[in-house]
Image (spheres, rainbow, N blue to C red):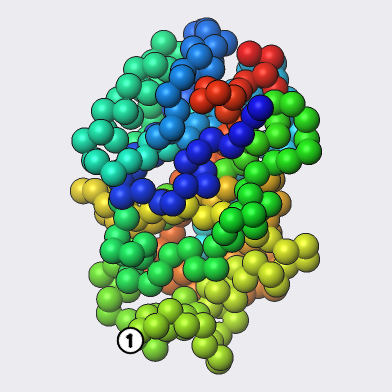
Amino acid sequence: MSAPQPGILSPVPSHARFLEFVALPDCDTHAVLRDLAALSDCQNLVVGFGSGLIRTVGGTIAALHAFPAMSGTGCEVPSTQADIWCWVTGEDRGEVLHQGRQFAAAVSAAFRCVRAVDGFRYKSGLDLTGYEDGTENPEGEDAVEAAILQSAGPGLDGSSFVAVQQWLHDLDHFETLPREDTDNIIGRRLSDNVEFDGSPESAHVKRTAQESFEPEAFVLRRSMPWADDNGAGLYFTAFGKSFAAFEAQLKRMTGQEDGVVDGLFRFTRPITGGYYWCPPQVDGSLDLSALEI
């Protein structure tokens, strides 16, 4: 019986590596996907496929499409869609590194890695700004309802759709802002993580309050901080049973509804964006039967 890839619903790990791959020209992508379907140890991996790759192998996943670029006043949301996305998770950074290398080797006959981002858990699950990340995330059955496709048929039940973005923070600028300003940007107090009355309409929690949409726009966030020689920020990861909830939130954040842009754009911006379908598992292996693989 098919089940979700375990990492989707598991707690955020201590360490992770996010890998994105694009297909090489004139290579046998079918053969590589057949090899992936035969992998028997996927407990520390979450794997997703982009719409372009699905079309290339002759498959159809109805709700899957490329990440849409958006813009608003003073903000740009780019699309950097790839073909394969892999989230390697673990409690030991060295093991995560080696598992990522093994996955890259497994697909190297037809895919080239174009992006590798190392993520980590900061304190109790904070963003690098010090504010809590993932407040009011759905849990238990609510998480399954938000993130996992159900009653869609064999090969689809247990699958999920993931939206990923690498956000680059300007921490130097952020740290110059008065605490009142940063609390108003987020819409929660740094001191106790409590949402407060009187925050502006641009406050992030108001822009993305999941229950304020019609229909409600719940996603399961599994984001992690990242840092390297080029900067630092948040690797945003949101799983859903479709992309509808994430897109509703993103449109509101960029002011598509009312012209009000999310306060986050005062100190951070996304530099990547991709959509992927994460197939279910059967007996610990990826179930690619929906693609007839």
78 over 193 or under it: above or below: above
Q: 186 or 161, which lies in front?
A: 161
**Residue at 59% from the left image edge and 24% from the top image edge:** 282
Q: Is residue 113 left or right of residue 258?
A: left
Instruction: Using the image as rendered, state which of residue 226 and residue 192 is in the foreground.
Output: 192
Quarter location, residue 290: top right
Residue plotted at (36% across, 22% down): 104
> Where does the image place residue 170, in percent across and percent down from the top left?
32, 65
Residue 92, image quadrant: top left
List x then y, in percent, for residue 105. 34, 17
Which quadrant holds residue 97?
top left
- 151 vs 217, left or right, is right
Element marked by disc 1 = loop
Q: Give the percent coordinates (x, y) of residue 23.
A: 49, 20
Q: Is residue 246 visible?
A: no
Is residue 144 or residue 256 the one in the foreground?
A: 144
Mark 1: which amino acid?
Answer: Pro
Q: How many marks?
A: 1
Image check: 176 left or right of 89?
left
The answer, for residue 199, to whether it is visible in the render is: yes
Q: Quadrant of the C terminus?
A: top right
In the depicted structure, whether residue 293 falls above or below residue 139: above
Query: Residue 279 at what x, y percent from top left?
Result: 60, 30
Q: Residue at x 62, y 71 (%)?
A: 209
Q: Is residue 143 above or below residue 59?
A: below
Label 1 Cα crowd, 10 Å radius (few <14 / some 14-19 / many 20+) = few
**Dividing the image into 4 quarters, which one contains the N terminus?**
top right
Q: Residue at x 47, y 47 (%)?
A: 10
Instruction: Identify the residue under disc 1.
Output: 178
